Image (tube, rainbow, N blue to C red):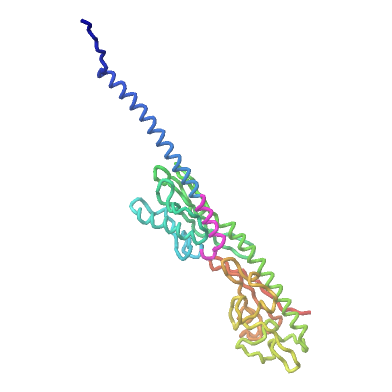
Amino acid sequence: MLKTRHASVGFTLLELVAVLAVMSLLSLGVLSGLASYLEFSQRQSTRLRIAQLRDSLERCFATRPHEVFSGPANTLTIAGTALPDMASMNAAQAGALISVSANLWSSLRTCSSPSLETLTSDGFNQPWLLQVSSDLLLDLPTVSIPYRVAVIISTGANTRLESAFDPRTGIVSVGGDDVAEVVDGIGIMQDLHAEALRKSRVLASAYREYFTTRYLASTSRAYEIDYFAGTDSSGNPLTPLWDGPTPEGNGGGIVGNTRGQEIPATAPELRLLDALGLAMSDVTLRAGFPLRVDNSSPAVNSPDNPDPARSLPPFSARVIAPLPGARELITTVSGVVD
């Protein structure tokens, strides 16, 4: 009889242990690789998002400087929301961190329109940290303008803030695996000052030429007449000391009186743009802040000045450019005629 031998297909315990060990090592390597790739992907996403936030915040700084720096120190005010420095918040205030991070995103959307809703958090799904300096001063020959430095920070994979920010100088030292972007307001303030200075000079020069033209058009050419306005401070055009109608046929100037105060150069009742041939954009700073004009307050020489020494020629007017931090750039226009 033919006998058949059956081969054993089982594994010994030692063989099973060896196989499991190899599989464990392989799985650990795969998982480690996946974890490294995931962290790399999250970090790349964080860098992309924070760059978009920085660009949006820079646009807010550039287009709304008067508003952004209008609130208390160590804050940014955007779309009516005061965004505080978050350095003092800790893990116990996680709700506040998330709230400010969300407010940062929603406020910045008013200045730009990134399409990613995920910008509300970093690539690790953690809220952004916003740190804001105290008021720093840009000293210029004519005025000192306050500005602030803002830093947007992601605390990275370990979720610990390891960067140091000095609010007195606006200098940040990025540490650990933090990711940070800085938005410095000093360049914005320099640009705004240059714009205010240029437009103030254009308006002042045109207003000075208007005074001279009105003087030359007057039949009397009297030095005691203030040709900066066609009425006195009460609105009366029939006064011999202002450029109103005269019996000799002078039709009078069309520029209104600021009635003892500063008023926007764009005010319809002033008719300044019509008189000087200027456009709205010539006398408006960014974000709709118009230059202001004063032709009859106690700060200028005019026939209605209560100070006798300042009620005599040469008459003057002022052009006022509003700057952030309640600062002003003032240009005086003198009505001296030859």
Magenta residues, start to end: 51-67
Residue 309 appearing in the image? no
Establish if 172 lies above or below 212: above
Q: In this view, does 123 lie to the left or right of 136?
A: left
| Percent x, y of residue 156 | 43, 44
| Percent x, y of residue 288 | 57, 69
Residue at (34% x, 26% y) in the render: 23
Residue 45 is a magenta residue: no
| Percent x, y of residue 40 | 45, 39
Q: Nearer the viewer, residue 195 or 335?
A: 195
Q: In this view, does 136 lie to the left or right of 222?
A: left
Residue 132 appearing in the image? yes
Type of secondary structure dominating the magenta stretch:
helix
Residue at (68% x, 87% y) in the render: 242
Q: In this view, does 150 lie to the left or right of 32?
A: right
Task: State the quadrant of the C terminus.
Answer: bottom right
Task: State the quadrant of the N terminus.
Answer: top left
Residue lying farthest to the top in this orientation: 1
Establish if 63 lies above or below 308: above
Q: Nearer the viewer, residue 28 or 251?
A: 28
Residue lying farthest to the bottom in this orientation: 247
Q: In this view, does 238 lie to the left or right of 183?
A: right
Residue 63 is a magenta residue: yes
Establish if 226 lies above or below 101: below
